[in-house]
Amino acid sequence: MLRRVLEEFGLFLIPFALFLVYLLLTGRNPLRRMHWDPHVLRLVLAGLAVVIGTLVYEGLFSERRPGGYVPAHMENGRLVPGGFR
């Protein structure tokens, strides 16, 4: 679960990283707040769009398994590992 949250947070930060690169390429100081203030709302919306887009894409095109998860159990005195069937 934590891996999934970190992945989505990383995707959210992509527009901010691209804007930072843009500021560096245009010769502006990315540490000055005056360069970020007019664009923060657009960057947040772009980040949310990227996250929502990836969630929708994965929901539509992820691998489907026909069976359900069978937990680990005992058969004839031996432990049978769980898995998707």
Image (tube, rainbow, N blue to C red):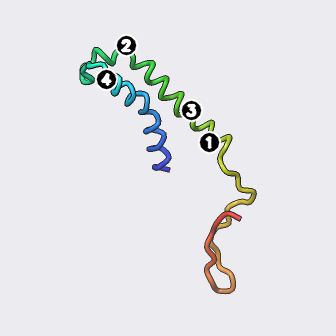
Compute the Cα span from label 2 to label 3.
23 Å
Location of mark 1 (residue): 58
Q: Residues within 10 Å of mark 1 (few under 14, many from 20)?
A: few
Q: Whole-Å distance between the Cαs marked 1 and 4?
A: 33 Å
**Where does the image place residue 82, in percent across and percent down from the top left?**
63, 69
Q: Looking at the image, is mark 4 or mark 3 nearer the viewer?
A: 4
Residue 50 % position (x, y): 52, 31
> Which residue is labeled 2 in the image?
38
- Circles 1 and 3: CB atoms closer than 8 Å: no
Q: Earlier in the sequence, mark 1 or mark 3?
A: 3
Question: Sequence order check: which comes first, mark 1 or mark 2?
Answer: 2
- Can you tell which of label 1 and label 4 is closer to the viewer? 4
Residue labelled with disc 4? 25
Mark 3 residue crowding within 10 angstroms, few (<14) / some (14–19) / many (20+) = some
Task: Give the Cα separation between the discs numbered 4 and 3.
Answer: 29 Å
Q: Is residue 52 left or right of residue 66?
A: left
Q: Residue at x 45, y 33 (%)?
A: 12
Q: Secondary structure at mark 1?
A: helix
What is the quadrant of residue 81 in the picture?
bottom right
Q: Nearer the viewer, residue 8 or 77?
A: 8
Q: Amino acid at mark 3?
A: Ile
